[in-house]
Amino acid sequence: VDDALAGAHDVSMAVTARDQLRLALTSAGFSMRKWTSNDDRILRGLPTDHLLNKNFLEIDEESTTKTLGVRWNAKLDQFYFAASPIPLKDSFTKREVLSIIAKLFDPAGWLGPIVIVAKILMQQIWSEKTDWDEYLSECSSLKWRQFIVDYGYIDNIKISRWVGFKPSVNLEVHGFSDASEKAYGACVYVRIQDEDGSIQSHLLLAKSKVAPLKTVSLPRLELCGASLLADLMDTVRKDLKFDETR
């Protein structure tokens, strides 16, 4: 493991956890580096050469880092994506397209509506039996160029890191699944009701899969979506330790 990612309900708890983590690792000869936080009080007392950037002690819009393949803005406390520009050309080979699709990294499924389009297109290219260095068919090429245009908009997507959870709130988890003839997917939301009655909801994670090439009935695909949702809900249940809090 080369990264540690954690949080706490208040600064004192976070500082205590920080010190305990440092002590445990130091006892084994490991020194934690590249520290970062959305609160500069948690970074105070750490050697400046142990910080990701000494400027994090004065958190501003540029205080960003990358964790688990997703970028994080410390000041806004938001996850975001930085799309690597994809050159727009008149034609693309199968090798070029599949290489780009393979680099799409979305561990939490937040880009599901975008990534699934690429997966469907990849399946279409395979079904057309295009050779690796052969240019895409006119139909696939048109869809790929449209994907490139749409892909640039992911720079506008922002995901709040904190979902509003604290011990005193009422927490509910809601899952949804659906299917079409081309793909099926599922997503999980967390619903938080605060002490004052205010309610907020946040997307936790999602997952999608392309429907098999062999014709499958829509009800069966919807069942596949429900099964996918059950797996996601089980993951959330274990991560949030529902069994321990009941």
Image (tube, rainbow, N blue to C red):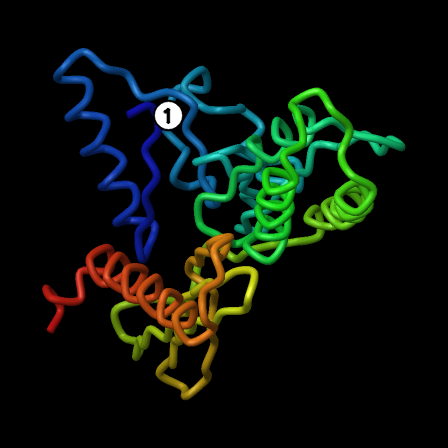
* 102 and 182: which is toward the camera: 182
Q: Residues within 10 Å of mark 1 (few under 14, many from 20)?
A: few
Q: Residue at x 69, y 25 (%)?
A: 96
- Residue 63 sits above or below residue 212 on the image: above
Position of residue 232 measured from the top left corner of the image (x, y, whole percent): 32, 60
Residue type at numbered disc 1: Leu
Position of residue 219 measured from the top left corner of the image (x, y, whole percent): 42, 76
The quadrant in which residue 171 appears is bottom left
Q: Quadrant of the C terminus?
A: bottom left
Farthest bottom residue in view: 197
* 101 and 9: which is toward the camera: 101
The residue beneath circle 1 is 46
Q: Residue at x 13, y 17 (%)?
A: 27
Position of residue 170 measured from the top left corner of the image (x, y, whole percent): 30, 79
Position of residue 179 measured from the top left corner of the image (x, y, whole percent): 49, 69
Count the numbered circles shown: 1
Q: Residue at x 38, y 80 (%)?
A: 194
- Residue 218 sits above or below residue 48 on the image: below
Q: Quadrant of the N terminus?
A: top left
The quadrant in which residue 28 appears is top left
Horizontal arrangement in the rendering, residue 96 relative to residue 72 (left or right):
right
The quadrant in which residue 83 appears is top right
- Residue 210 sits above or below residue 192 on the image: above
* 228 and 133: which is toward the camera: 133
Horizontal arrangement in the rendering, residue 236 relative to residue 122 (left or right):
left
- Determine the secondary structure under disc 1: loop
Horizontal arrangement in the rendering, residue 40 relative to residue 55 (left or right):
left
